[in-house]
Every structure is written in structure tokens, then in C-alpha cells.
Amino acid sequence: MDVKNCASGKNEFGQWHIACSDVAAPALQILQELSSTNTVSPLGITYYQAARWICSHAGVSWTTNALGLPTTCAALPAVDPF
């Protein structure tokens, strides 16, 4: 899992997802498989940049393939660790 190569997107139901590239697929492909292409962040950004992008677009929470990282705006640290 490459948490420095991610993107976030929202599907047609308003659900947000952060996809980080892994050995099986790049972030954009993962978002496309989840139908999260209605609103998509820039590609190739860090997990925390993708999360803050969601928060800046009125999102509150999201799902992700990057386990163990925050999944709500309220849980984001004040300073990004990377």
C-alpha cells in the first residue's frame, strides 16, 4: 500500500473513498471500480492530502483501502505525519 500515492473520490450516492495505489491497482482504477468518479481529487497525493480534500469539499467521513489511518475529518491530526 502506497499511502503517498492516493486519490479521493465520491460516488453517485455521495459516499467518499480514499484509494491508495497498491500492487494490484493504481488509485484511479480502485476509485473507478468503486464508482467513485463523480468528484475526484488530484491523483498521486498523500493519504492526508486526499483526506483534507474530502473535508474541504463538505465530506465528513470516508472508506479506504489504507487500513489503520483516520477515516473522519475529526480524527485527522493537526499536522500530517508525512
Image (cartoon, rainbow, N blue to C red):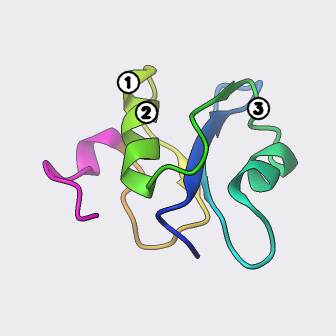
Q: Which residue is mark 3?
A: 37
Q: Tell me the crowding category of disc 1: few under 14, some 14 to 19, or many 20 or more residues within 10 angstroms, Cα based.
A: few
Taking the magenta stretch, the answer to whether it contains residue 76 is yes
Q: Are marks 3 and 1 in contact (CB under 8 Å)?
A: no
Q: Which amino acid, by three-letter code, is at mark 2?
A: Trp
Q: Is residue 63 above or below residue 4?
A: above
**Residue farthest to the front, as pictured:** 44
Q: Which mark is residue 53?
A: 2
What's under tag 3, amino acid-wise? Answer: Thr
Please report the residue visible at 44 percent of the width from the left and 55 percent of the height from the top.
46
Q: Is residue 43 left or right of residue 32?
A: left
Could you tell me which secondary element the residue under label 2 belongs to? helix
Query: What segment is highlighted magenta in the picture?
Result: 73-82
What residue lies at 46% left-to-right and 33% top-to-bottom? 54
Alpha carbons under labels 3 and 1: distance apart = 17 Å
Q: What residue is disc 1 on?
A: 56
Decide if residue 11 is on the left or right side of residue 68.
right
> What is the magenta segment's predominant secondary structure?
loop
For badge 1, the amino acid type reads Ser
